[in-house]
Image (tube, rainbow, N blue to C red):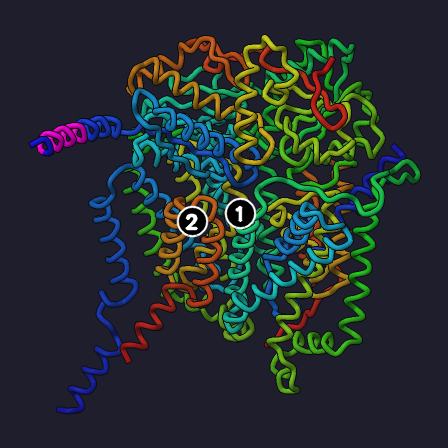
Amino acid sequence: MRFIKFARAALALAGSLAAAGGALAQEPIRIGAFLSVTGPAAFLGDPEQKTLEMVVERINAAGGVLGRKLQLVAYDDSGDAEKARTFAKRLLEQDQVDVIVGGSTTGTTMAVVPLVEAAGTPFVSLAGAVVIVEPPKKWVFKTPHTDRMACEKIFVDMQTRKLSKVALISGAGGFDKSMRGECLKVAPKYNIEVVADETYGATDNDMTAQLTKLRTSGAQAVLNAGFGQGPAIVTRNYRQVGLTLPLYQSHGVASMEYVKLSGPAAEGVRLPAAALLVPDLLASNDPQKPVVTAYKRDYEARFKSDVSTFGGHAYDGLMLVVGAITRAGSTDKAKVRDALESTKGYVGTAGVVNMSPTDHMGLDLSAFVMLEVKGGTWSLAR
Amino acid sequence: MGSNWLQFVASGVTSGAIYALVALGFSIIYNASGAINFAQGEFVMIGGMSAVMLLALGLPLLVALPLAVLVAVIVALLVEKLAIEPARHAGTVTLIIITIGVAMFLRGLAQLLWGKGVHRLPAFSSEQPIEWLGATILPQSLWVMGGAALAVVALSWFYGRTLLGKAMRATSHNRIAAQLVGINTRGVLLASFGLAAGLGALGGVLIAPIAFTSYDSGIMLGLKGFAAAMLGGLGSFTGAVLGGLVLGLLEGLGAGFVSSAYKDAIAFVVILAVLFLMPGGLLGGRGSERV
Amino acid sequence: MDAAANVSETRSAAEPRWWARPRGGGLLLLAAVIALLPLVLANNYFYEVAILVALNATVCVGLNLLIGYAGQISLGHAGFFALGGYGSAILATRYALPPWLSLPLACAAVALLALLIGRPTLRLKGHTLAMATLGLGIIVSIVINTEDGLTGGPDGMAVPPLVLFGWTVAGERSWYWITGAVLLVTVWLAFNLIESPSGRALRALHGSEVAAQTLGIDNGRTKLQVFVLSALVAAVAGALMAHYAGFITPAKASFMHSVELVIMVVFGGMASVFGAVVGAAVLTMLPQALTVLKDYEMMVFGGVLIATMVFFPQGVVPTLAQWWTRRQT
């Protein structure tokens, strides 16, 4: 008799547990991603993919969002805009994702913009060019600083060092050309004159010819708007030909890999970067300090490689989306979009984000720090 | 301005020596099989990346370098046995596609084993640039040029004086006749692959200190190496080195005097002009056409 | 009595009915596949893949005429493809021409370019020809990449949609029918060419250039005709692709893309029109299917390529056809 009572109670308990489990086993929230994990932009896409996987796992382990698990559907576009478009279509039509975080490069992002606008799906891009959010597109947002901001940060620094003539050297890739274009546009605003403008190929192994031409151009500083391995070769060649002018690099090489490849030649190089690279140098009351310290620690422990600002952009993108979904209380695309657009005071790896209907990026110049390479590692430029 | 052109030349010669080393590998395999090996760039990459990995494991440079070359040779022998030999009766176009497949396979494998990062080897002697008449060149560039020159001398000796080398030459001239005199033509093909890979890997470790290395560095190197080999004359070793140097110089001088954005285009235009006028390349390979 | 019966038997054995011949029957099969495929295409993503297959197959059929039938090689065909796309895009945006005019103009311009560079280039043979076409393709790629004022540079440029007789072609379904029709027409044209006197001249040329010359065939002209035709076909496909995607980037002119096209032709089978279609279909769909493999994708793709060429040295379709006929006898 007692056994039967016990059995009934046990069955009831099991039943309610199953029901609870069943409630958790709802439709997962599908996060779509297309990233350049291989190819010329692997420097961007690889840490982005790793970050997304790591953060999704962590969120799911903590119970998910709105009681639902996150499901990441990620594809590798190898840096090709057409492949990115096909994968975006796959995400929207076949995988039926609720939101997209991706687009490692400007080219891949812009190819997908018409699709997300037509499908009415929120899309957070991880690419740099200012054209992504200017003019603002209803469903498109982005997390990284724009290349224009990088130029401005560098020019401001040049002004404080009383330098007014700059020589540009840039590569042939999309990032390089876009940043070069922006620098040419904003230079007059800071009373800076561009006295030379050289370029090199993405896979070139010697830039001494171009740097020699810069030497006689009357420049007081050199700006290398580049990305990938080119800037490291430029830096080494720079010392080789005996140039001693201040050298500025772009945020595209804000990584220890650049410093290691360039070796001692990188001493004294300055570049704008996210606070993510120097968590220990941040003031103890800096709101970014806990966020970047935690992310850097988790990423380096899990993947045994240096943290990267690009991975940080993916982190911010995902957290912004998660925050928006939580605030919207559902995955209804329009509501999530509105919640994204009204993000205020989100503290991420790139800075503090305040979005608005006219600003779908939300960062300002203070989000960048000017770093200088000293003793083979980063230090804050003085 | 006076010393500028010398720097352009130095820059060109540095790149050129790199292309020369890759081009030599193309000529070797062309001589043995009549086909273009589009995986040659990947052998260069394997040499560089293996050396980086072995160094990271703690081995001294002097041990890591020959081991890296050995790794590439072993990979090439495996590739030849598993992918090339089974298709040796197919046409050259099929063989070319197979080597493209091999290149992709090796690249994918490298990406899995060694990741997608870019790596550098320490320079063999010194990192201090050498200055001469206002132009500078890195000591490592001299190593690369020396390596290319040494390779040509060694290959000429090998092909001219050793039995295996002569057997390779005989096979390249007339495979059936070579078989009739008892040469193991399959072994010749195998040895050629090993030799080309070894040379490519040697190039890879020599250039890693200045041009870096990564899982996909083989693509562009293979392309430029092929162009250099064609320019100099496919099948000729001195031609390969000459082609490499000329290509490098065209790029350096083009970047310096004309336009740094178009330097590759300028180089290719010149190569095309040469090929239109001298289809056999500068030093002409085997130019006879069977009727 | 017996003799008469023998004659009629040998005649029907030697000359298969029109639906059993590749041109008639195969074309019908292709048309049927194109017409019936929408029944299994579940959503726009599948339509997208089908459209890409159709466009790639169109280029490959043209390229196959050059590689398989004429025995030449082109490692720069992506250049023609991209020039068709960019030409139409630039004429439609910067010069505000309507797309129904910009597309044919751009393709005609590409054909003219092919005519001009074809004469000197096709005098080269073998690897030298490969190098020359490779170099030309790269030069096109560099120019497109560098002239960013005109082409938008490495990030590419937006392309307006195609407007035919007031009807804006939009949506995957419409494009599916258009690209399917273009593929069908291209295949039909290819067969017409192959079975015409020009086609026979082509095949004679492939067999032996010297022998063909002794028969009075103008090698130079024949080769040039096929070169220009294949360039034109590539340009048309490129322009359609640009208007469909609404976007074009310099990657379409890259050496890698040229190599992909050649791989499709050789994989499917040289000197086989349907081989080109099959090759394009398989190698367009394979990367989509292999995405599950993530990091292993490149390795597996390379491995598939190697294995296929080792076991099907003539390419998939001709080898399968050989096996089939061997089983018949």
Could you give the CA–CA distance between mark 2 and mark 1, rounded to whole angstroms?
A: 39 Å
Specify the quadrant that holds the C terminus of chain B: bottom right
Q: Are marks 2 and 1 on the same chain?
A: no
| Residue B60 on image: x %, y % | 76, 50
**Chain on which label 1 sits:** B
| Residue C240 on image: x %, y % | 39, 40
At x 42%, y 50%, the residue is: C59
Vertical order, C264 against A165 (above or below): below
Q: Residues within 10 Å of mark 2 (few under 14, many from 20)?
A: many
The magenta span reads: A4-15
| Secondary structure at numbered mark 2 | helix
Q: Which label sits on residue C233? A: 2
Q: Which label sits on residue B112? A: 1
- Image quadrant assignment for residue B148: bottom right
Can residue A341 be seen by looking at this rendering? yes
Q: Amino acid at mark 2?
A: Val
Q: Nearer the viewer, residue A260 or C177?
A: A260
Q: Is residue A10 magenta?
A: yes
Specify the quadrant that holds the N terminus of chain B: top right
| Residue C82 on image: x %, y % | 49, 41
Image-based side of C285 in relation to B266, left or right? left
